[in-house]
Image (cartoon, rainbow, N blue to C red):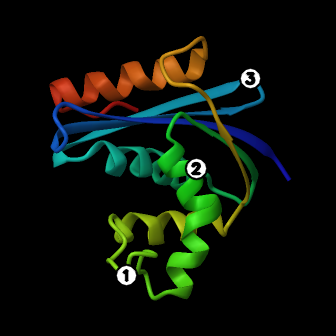
């Protein structure tokens, strides 16, 4: 099974407001950068979208090491989601899970792979995280996509 490293980030100008997402896929010496935007969204939706888009880009089942600076994303997919599904997509406070559509999509994509989640501090000395932040912020500002 191939090991792919996926780095993700999301950005939003205002929250809600124009948003951008970005991811970097690394396999051996190969590198692919993806990014896109939404005209009206939230930062959390962009964080989720970055992970989904990165996983969608994989053509086969892989061991994927996913690095994010979003505790919301990492905790949501590794811990909270099991309770949400058990409780009919309701939180402990008996409120509907925010961004359910994206959580369901992410859960579906993660199930295709052996996923390992890592958290990194944002805006620190992590080269790929900083590059994803740059791409996501640029996409949000200019509302354009890159590949």
Q: Residue 23 vs residue 18: left or right?
A: right
Q: Front-most of 114 and 70?
A: 70
The relative height of residue 82 versus residue 113 in the rendered view (above or below) is below
Q: Secondary structure at mark 1?
A: loop
Q: Which residue in the protein does label 1 denote?
A: 94
Q: Residue at x 61, y 75 (%)?
A: 82
Callout 3: SS? loop
Front tag of 3 and 2: 2
In the picture shown, does residue 62 fall above or below 28?
A: below
On the image, the x and y values in percent for residue 68 come to 56, 37
Residue 20 % position (x, y): 29, 36
Instruction: Kindly report the distance in space between the C-alpha atoms of the residues bearing marks 3 and 2.
Output: 26 Å
Residue at horizontal 31 percent and vertical 42 percent from the top = 43
Residue for point 74% across, 23% down = 29
Q: Earlier in the sequence, mark 3 or mark 1?
A: 3
Q: Are there few (<14), some (14-19), or many (20+) residues within 10 Å of tag 1?
A: few
Which residue reaches farthest right?
Answer: 1
> Which residue bears the numbered disc 3?
29
Q: Residues within 10 Å of mark 3 (few under 14, many from 20)?
A: few
Task: Tell me what residue is drawn at x 16 percent, y 44 percent.
Answer: 16
Kindly indicate whether the residue at mark 2 contacts the one at mark 3 (C-beta within 8 angstroms).
no
Q: Nearer the viewer, mark 3 or mark 1?
A: 1
In this view, which residue lies farthest toward the front? 93
Indicate the secondary structure of the residue bearing disc 2: helix
Quadrant of image for the C terminus: top left
Percent position (x, y) of residue 85? 53, 82
Answer above or below: position of 30 versus 1. Answer: above
Mark on residue 74?
Answer: 2
Label 3 vs 2, first from the N-terminus:
3
Whether tag 2 and tag 1 are in contact, CB under 8 A, the answer is no
Image side of residue 135 versus residue 118, left or right = left
Q: Is residue 11 left or right of residue 111?
A: left
């Amino acid at each position: 099974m191939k090991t792919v490293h996926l780095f993700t980030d999301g950005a939003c100008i205002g929250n809600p407001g124009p948003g951008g997402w970005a991811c970097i896929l690394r396999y051996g010496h190969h590198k692919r950068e993806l990014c896109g935007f939404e005209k009206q969204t939230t930062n959390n939706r962009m964080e989720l979208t970055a992970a989904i888009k990165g996983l969608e880009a994989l053509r086969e089942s892989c061991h994927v090491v996913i690095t994010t600076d979003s505790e919301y994303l990492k905790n949501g997919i590794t811990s909270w989601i099991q309770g949400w599904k058990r409780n009919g997509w309701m939180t402990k406070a008996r409120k509907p899970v925010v961004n359910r559509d994206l959580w369901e999509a992410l859960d579906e994509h993660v199930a295709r792979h052996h996923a390992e989640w890592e958290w990194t501090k944002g805006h620190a000395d992590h080269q790929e995280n900083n590059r994803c932040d740059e791409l996501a912020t640029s996409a949000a500002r200019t509302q354009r996509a890159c590949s």
